[in-house]
Image (tube, grey):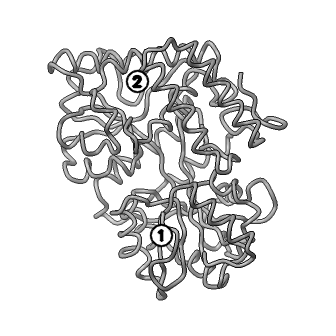
Amino acid sequence: MTKLKLTAALLGTTLALGAGAAHAEGLLFWSTQAKPVEETQKMRDEVLAGFGAAVDYQASDEGPWITRIDAETQAGSGSIGLLGGLHGDFTSVEDSLADVPTDLAAAGVVPGYVELGKLGGDSQKYVPWMQATYMMAANKQALEYLPEGAELNDLTYDQLIDWCKAIAEGTGGPKCGLPAGPKGLKHRFFQGYLVPSYTGGMVSTFKTAEAEEGWNKFKELWQYMNPASTNYGFMQEPLLTGEVWVAFDHTARLADAFNQKPDDFVAFATPKGPKGRGYMPVIAGMAIPTNAPDAAASAALIDYMLKPETQIATLKATNFFPVVDVTLPDDMPPSVKAAGEVISYTSTSPDSITALLPMGLGDAGGKFNQVYTDMFERSVLGGQPVRAALDDQAKALEAIMQETGAPCWAPDAASEGPCPVN
């Protein structure tokens, strides 16, 4: 048996800082998480089936998720029994959340995660549910091309460039990859990893000289990326086919590679820049709307979701890790062991810079992400000089921050009023 020690480790760095209608009878669990069809079905069949009462789990994109919550709040009555979302999602609908009656101390939730769920206030607005992050994965065939003296968990961006170059030259074509397709999470790479690694911030350092250096470095790296990266959504697929040998993605979107061919791949931490290693922990939670049809039933479902056996079932279904201490059975998938070791290493590394998911943006979250996507498309794909693209995109970013009034979040220093764009 293996004792999971990840929650306390991830806590240290963290604190340093759909469908429109129910399709089945039962308590409606309206969530921005487990959106892939396979994960949604596993949530229904393998996680929620043991609750003892009918639960209609429906996954939604962030925009429709917020829109429906706002509409039901304004109407004064609602059909949503339980909300699932990321920390930043809940900051956008805080006024629509009831105080949670669950005894989180008895449930064994790490105290620091409990504090995050208070959203800066005194009452519990959401309950931590599960956690994950992003990491690197490589086919073991790529290891022979590692630069001399380079260590997987201590790579710099320069070493990653040299590695990808050596692979391309040694195999006759680029075999590094990024989920840069329409459904890929490339914006999280730029927000949480590249920019913080070079600037120490995400928003307030957006157009600095350090940011310019980071984007130019990424342009160097891109020439050794498989051109099909602009079509990739989940990197587990090109890893399994051999199109890509070295990749970055969310732990859940790499799981199939490790589970199907556990002897072929190795997981490791993301690279470091001049400021350190940008690192984006993903904290998901559960909340009860103020006008839930049956708040007691919603609270009972929360209690069920926090049980150790349910947390383990959730891990198997989604590759998101527990937020309580649990003893993992020996038969856990290889992806769990691979991701767990990377999460533990990255979250405890003194070089890591915790970059929280964007918060306080409301329904402008998509526009915020688009700023980074547009920066990539203009400067990397389109060939526009980085400085010109940064200056233009900084105007769009500043407009979003002024429109939403969102203050800075980690790794940027706290601000009075909208986070400045420097």
Identity of the residue drawn at 29% across and 14% down: 148
Within-10-Å neighbours for mark 1: few <14, some 14–19, many 20+:
many
Q: Quadrant of residue 303?
A: bottom right
Residue beneath the point at 49% across and 54% down: 5
Determine which quarter of the picture holds residue 409. top right
Task: List the residue tagged with mark 2.
Answer: 155
Report the amino acid beneath label 2.
Answer: Leu
Q: Is residue 348 above or below residue 70?
A: above
Residue 411: quadrant of the picture: top right
> Residue shown at 28%/45% (left/top)?
236
Instruction: Where is residue 272? Give x, y as percent.
Output: 48, 24
Q: Nearer the viewer, residue 335 or 25?
A: 25
Q: Nearer the viewer, mark 2 or mark 1?
A: 1
Q: Amino acid at mark 1?
A: Gln
Q: Which residue is mark 1?
A: 58
* Vertical relation: 169 (above or below) 395: above
Left or right: 33 with respect to 365?
left
Counting from the top left corner in percent of width and height, residue 35 is at 43, 59
Q: Is residue 147 above or below residue 371?
A: above
Residue 170 location (% of width, % of height): 16, 17
Q: Looking at the figure, which quarter contains the N terminus?
A: bottom left
Asked which secondary structure carries label 1, the reply is: strand
Does residue 287 appear to the left or right of 243 in the view shown?
right
Quadrant containing the C terminus in the rendered view: top right
Q: CA distance from mark 2 to mark 1?
A: 40 Å
Among the two numbered marks 2 and 1 on one chain, the one whose residue lies closer to the N terminus = 1
Looking at the image, which residue sits at the far bottom?
Answer: 52
State whether residue 398 is above or below residue 301: above
Identify the element where label 2 is drawn: loop
